[in-house]
Image (cartoon, rainbow, N blue to C red):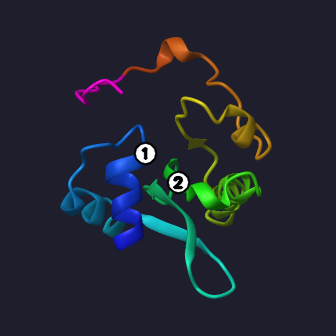
Amino acid sequence: MDHVARWITTDAYWAKGRTREVVERSFANSVPVGVYTPDGRQAAVARVVSDYATFVWFCDVYVDPSHRGRGLGTMLANWSVEWAERHGIKRVMLATLDAHGVYTKAGFAPIGHPERWMEIDNRPPF
């Protein structure tokens, strides 16, 4: 959890400033997935938030800078889609500022009917 907390709280644009306690709680209440090097070092992380019936939110995807450009983000995105399919879940959502190409490779597309979606977002701007 040390790498994950450092990555998420200090480098992830969407979560800078989260406390370690919040990161730990978010991962404890989700389905976390990690990618590791052959010698056991963590190279990437993500998590799935789901009701296990109708909805998956794929989030907190982070690839260590030294491992970027190797397809790990796409591998994690594919994993989330496969996880949803194994559970019979038809909707998988995510949000990204700059990795649209990564997620398109896994089948993600812009939201259909964005006029139907609403949110409350009290986070500080990033």
* Residue 31 pos. (x, y %): 46, 67
| Left/right of residue 50 with respect to residue 69 in the rendered view | left
Q: Which residue is mark 2?
A: 62
Point out the residue furthest to the front here: 66
Quadrant containing the C terminus in the rendered view:
top left
Residue 39 highlighted magenta (yes or no):
no
Q: What residue do we see at 64% from left, 36% from top?
A: 99
Q: Nearer the viewer, residue 65 or 95?
A: 65
Quadrant containing the N terminus in the rendered view:
bottom left
Q: Nearer the viewer, residue 11 or 56?
A: 11
- For disc 2, the neighbor class at 10 Å (few under 14, some 14 to 19, many from 20) is many
Q: At label 1, which amino acid type do we have?
A: Ala
Q: What residue do we see at 64% from left, 88% from top?
A: 39
- For disc 1, the neighbor class at 10 Å (few under 14, some 14 to 19, many from 20) is some
Badge 1 marks a residue whose secondary structure is loop
The magenta-colored residue range is 119-126
Real-space Cα distance between discs 2 and 1? 7 Å
Q: Quadrant of residue 23?
A: bottom left
Q: Which residue is mark 1?
A: 12
Disc ID at residue 117: none
Task: Please identify the dominant SS of the magenta region.
Answer: loop
- Pointer 2 and pointer 1: residues touching (CB < 8 Å)? yes
Point out the residue furthest to the top here: 115
Above or below, comparing residue 55 to residue 51 in the picture: above
Above or below, comparing residue 85 to residue 43 in the picture: above
Q: How many numbered circles does the render carry? A: 2
Q: What residue do we see at 33% from left, 62% from top?
A: 5
Q: Earlier in the sequence, mark 2 or mark 1?
A: 1
Q: At label 2, which amino acid type do we have?
A: Tyr
* Residue 46 pos. (x, y %): 52, 59
Residue 120 highlighted magenta (yes or no):
yes
Point out the residue furthest to the right here: 105
